[in-house]
Amino acid sequence: MQYQSQAVAKPYFIAALGLFAGQILFGLIMGLQYVMGDFLFPEIPFNVARMVHTNLLIVWLLFGFMGAAYYMVPEESEREIHSPKLALALFWIFLIAGALTIVGYLAVPYATLAKITGNDLLPTMGREFLEQPTITKIGIVIVVLGFLFNITMTVLKGRKTVVSSVMLIGFWGLAIFFLFSFYNPENLVLDKYFWWWVVHLWVEGVWELILGSILAFVLIKVTGVDREVIEKWLYIIIAMTLITGIIGTGHHYYWIGAPEYWQVLGSIFSALEPIPFFMMAVFAFNMVNQRRREHPNKAATLWALGTAVMAFLGAGVWGFLHTLAPVNFYTHGSQITAAHGHMAFYGAYVMIVLCIISYSMPLMRGRAAANPPKAQVVEMWAFWVMTISMVFITLFLTGAGILQIWLQRMGDTPMSFMAGQDQIALFYWLREIAGVGFLIGLITYFISFFVGGEEQAS
Amino acid sequence: MSEMFTKSMARNMFYGGSVFFFLLFLGLTFDTMSVLPERDHRENITPEVARGKMVWEVNNCVGCHSLMGEGAYFAPELANVYNRFGNSKDAIIGFIKSRPVDGIPGRRSMPQFNLSDDDLNAVAEFLKWTSEIDDAGWPPNIQG
Ligand code: HEM
Ligand code: HEM
Ligand SMILES: [Fe+2]
């Protein structure tokens, strides 16, 4: 660790991992409810478990991104963080607000939560991924603005690099597009249209800038390849991201009441969206092959390569699978969507956060350059168990999706939704087993932090 | 990568490309906004429909159901439930009203929300209005 203030990243990463565990627990609860409908009913209805699962995901990824920024920006800017105290204060505000929100979901009926948090004054609740009470949303805005101030000041006062500029643009975009979560018109079509400005323009827009900058940072460190080369790649990748991804938003406008030209525009541009993900994979492998040093942190390198490959598979391949309008007509809102959502989020965003944690945690814990080899072996096992489990979750959901569409949406005598779901229960059982595999991988990952052994010299 | 393609060219491609496509996106959004009224029939958004959307939201119905294909995939699609239930608001109201508090053993269950009669009517009106949006012929059939 070159700058002392980088250490504020540590609580961010620890909180992120704790919330990750909670997310998986609720994923497994829902997975059981899919096949045992009355499991935990009415104590934890499915919708409550789902909110907890997805909101924990988003919140822990944000913790991870912010931790990444606090770790990376001092090294890029060659100076201490503008205000480490502010960073720590925002950490506690965010953690407490997040925890209270989750407790609220679990402790009282959602309608009660809406009432006691004054949803009437500015109704923003009850939309997918944006279930947080309005005051929590305002809290998120305050935390992110404080964070942006802190990081922007640090960057402005120090050395300006492409990596930190791209990251900053990504975060500013994240904050700006989140503001659309406060727009909730009476007209459902308008509501949906601009809801995607948060969701799509995040994951297929500005978040990819954050992803790209973290990946570039780690690759610079572990490969020692010339920064100029890496920065050129980064620019090209994110250029392709926004050139394809902005109009690519149209792949969500096919069937929600928007005009039909979106079927053409959305299909063409979103069909090109895999390109930046493909380039990311080529980039990562090229840089590692051209490495100028043998960095002792093998695990971080594995996560870097893994995220590039899995993001390409989950977002690129599984995204392309259902993105053309004539295909999406049948797959829209089916288990195919869930399959893609899982692998894309895992490959692109979960793995990049675990990558920067893998790179930076040993340094923040005062180890020379990497964890002891034994600990790295355990971490790499965790990598494979989690990643392979996620591949199986995706495959089983894809199987379920294909059958769901066949039974419920095709043929002359389509089955009702509920009857169709009964027919494909086997796939949901298999998904749940793969989910248990994922949990085992996650536990292994946690264990790797406590494995000792000989320290590695840098 | 080719030496001919410099970092500053890549940077210009990023800034130029994103600004251009974002402006194009704004233009398309502007056009969409101008034609939406014919497709969403907003003239039919009565106070009941608006209230129904609120009921839909504060009970987090989208946490189990999809609506126009967006939401959760645990329970039936509801954008066309009005048609599936024989164009009957009463059938929708009756269904929501009759959910057992403790669920149905072994079956995916929907909570009993204890909605007032006004809220029940509002949410049914909202689902009826939703079923009339011109959504390019989705879903493929009545089962949603
Ligand atoms: C890392 C990047 C990505 C992430 C995290 C991601 C995640 C998701 C999620 C969670 C959904 C479900 C949204 C909902 O609940 O309604 C979704 C939907 C969708 N995604 Fe992605 N996605 C990514 C990239 C892509 C790409 C590159 C493509 C196209 C090539 C794509 C195509 C689609 C389509 C067509 C849908 C709509 C599915 C439907 O009609 O139900 N996604 N994505
Ligand atoms: C232990 C394994 C997991 C299980 C059993 C599981 C289960 C589920 C279930 C049942 C849903 C709701 C689907 C529905 O709406 O009907 C869901 C949604 C979701 N989960 Fe997971 N999950 C797991 C792990 C994960 C992980 C690791 C991630 C992140 C990478 C993740 C991200 C998501 C997302 C983004 C959604 C929303 C999907 C959409 O709207 O299409 N889950 N999960
Ligand atoms: Fe998208």
Image (spheres, coloured by chain):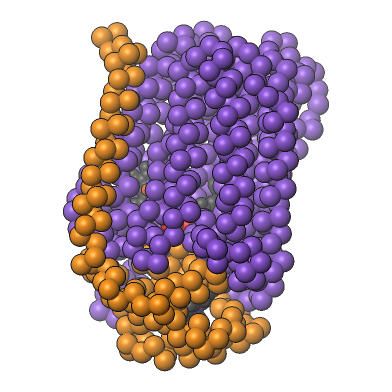
Chain colours: A purple, B orange
Q: Residue at x 38, y 34 (%)?
A: A277
A100 with respect to A51 (left or right):
right
Image: A291 above or below A83:
above
Q: Locate residue A417, reporting x and y percent.
A: 42, 75
Image: B97 above or below A395:
below
Q: Residue at x 30, y 20 (%)?
A: B12
Q: Residue at x 58, y 26 (%)?
A: A151
State the residue in front, B25 or A75.
B25
Q: Residue at x 44, y 81 (%)?
A: B122
Residue sitting farthest toward the front: A121
B109 with respect to B81 (left or right):
right
- Residue A275 visible in the current orientation: no
Q: Quadrant of residue A365?
A: top right
Image: B81 above or below A66:
below
State the residue in front, A353 or B26.
B26
Image: B83 above or below B144:
below
Q: Locate residue A82, reporting x and y percent.
A: 64, 21
